[in-house]
Image: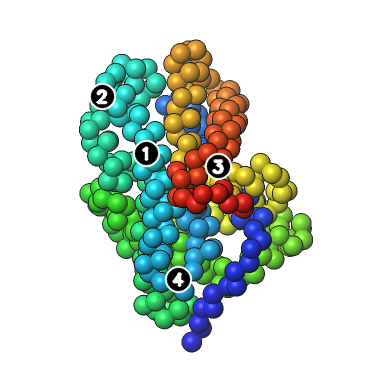
Amino acid sequence: MTQITPIQHQSTRIAWIDIARAVAMVLVFTGHLGTSWFPQLEPLTTAIYTFHMPLFFLLSGLFFKPTIDLLTLIAKRARTLLVPYYVFSVFALAAPIVKLLRPSLYQAAGKSTDSNPFEAIVAILFAQGNAGLWFLWSLFVGTLCLWITVRAVRSNRLALTIVLLAYLVVDCFLKGYPVVAQIPFQLGKIFEATAYVGFGYLVAQTCDIRGWDQLSINRKLGVFGITTVIFLILEHCSTAQPITSGVMLNALLLLTTFSGIAMAISFSLLLPEMRCFATIGRDSLVFYALNDIVLKTIKFALFSVAHIPVATLPFAGQLFTGILVLIMAMTICYALNAFVQRYMRWAIGDFSRHVMAE
């Protein structure tokens, strides 16, 4: 039987993984620009939503360690994921509270006032659907489920692969029932999260991920070119939906997701090591936690207060404006991250007395 042997722990960071996390974070910011202000960018944001969060799950799985005991794993992940979830959810609660108290102000920000703000508040508190920082709760339950799964298959690589694929099949089936997404604490996404975190774990065990930085530039370009072409073809097919069979369509969507992940990782390998990339990747949790409130504030200031008519601009104008908004938002988050790392380490689950150097 093919057994999984945990990779040896090394203190040095893997540069391309930090860069890949930074790329994934840029995709998150881009996806959150919103189609109400940027309708011309809808095809771009639709393509991004195909794979950007599975990419984060997979990157998280690269460092999964099944050798740790379950109680220790629960305590550690609760500290590093659930503490930030509830600390930074204070910002996520701002939108439904504004909708509740000042619906006209909420509408001026380009948002619909039809939904119930109380339901939104409950959804954030209980981590339902895509409310708030849902990814953190989803990663928490997915990591625990993966630990159980790896132990159940006795670290057999082939068996684990089959089980993870089965999880994706189950997830595709469950997505046909909207009520599943409303199960508290992201349990409705547990199969999806477990599968992608698990595939990241398998990649780390089967490949020399520390050696990927040393690949030749021609090889990196070749892989990026191939994965990009495959992704664009699959994305076009899944969007146009020439396939009517539900099974075939779900298979197409999964292939699109995996090709998008491969494209993003191969693109990350082409980027140079830069301090800004390393910081965004290393501290991606803070950037993720702050991106929504920062983007909403910037969009409100520019498009509701300053009345910049971005929604009526052509594609080039919306793309240019979107890039400027992204730069502004990431710059603000970069500065806020420095503050969090210096004075609010407790907000990201670090309760040690001294700031630990990376």
Q: Earlier in the sequence, mark 4 or mark 1?
A: 4
Measure the C-alpha gap from mark 3 to mark 2.
Answer: 33 Å
Measure the C-alpha gap from mark 4 to mark 2.
Answer: 45 Å
Disc 2 crowd rating (10 Å Cα; few below 14, some 14-19, many 20+) is some
Q: Earlier in the sequence, mark 4 or mark 3?
A: 4
> Which residue is at a point 42% across and 58% down the rendered structure image?
77
**Of circles 2 and 1, which is in front?**
1
On the image, numbered disc 1 is attached to which residue?
89
Q: What number is the disc on residue 341?
A: 3
Which amino acid is tagged 2? Answer: Leu
Disc 4 crowd rating (10 Å Cα; few below 14, some 14-19, many 20+) is few
Measure the C-alpha gap from mark 4 to mark 1.
Answer: 29 Å
Element marked by disc 2:
helix
**Of circles 4 and 2, which is in front?**
4
Give the percent coordinates (x, y) of residue 23: 59, 46
Q: Earlier in the sequence, mark 3 or mark 2?
A: 2
On the image, numbered disc 4 is attached to which residue?
68
Which amino acid is tagged 3? Answer: Gln
Q: Is residue 262 above or below residue 166?
A: above
Measure the C-alpha gap from mark 4 to mark 3.
Answer: 27 Å
> Which residue is at a point 36% across and 77% down the rendered structure image?
152
Of 223 and 7, nearer the camera is 7
Which amino acid is tagged 4? Answer: Ile
Give the percent coordinates (x, y) of residue 76: 43, 59
On the image, numbered disc 2 is attached to which residue?
100
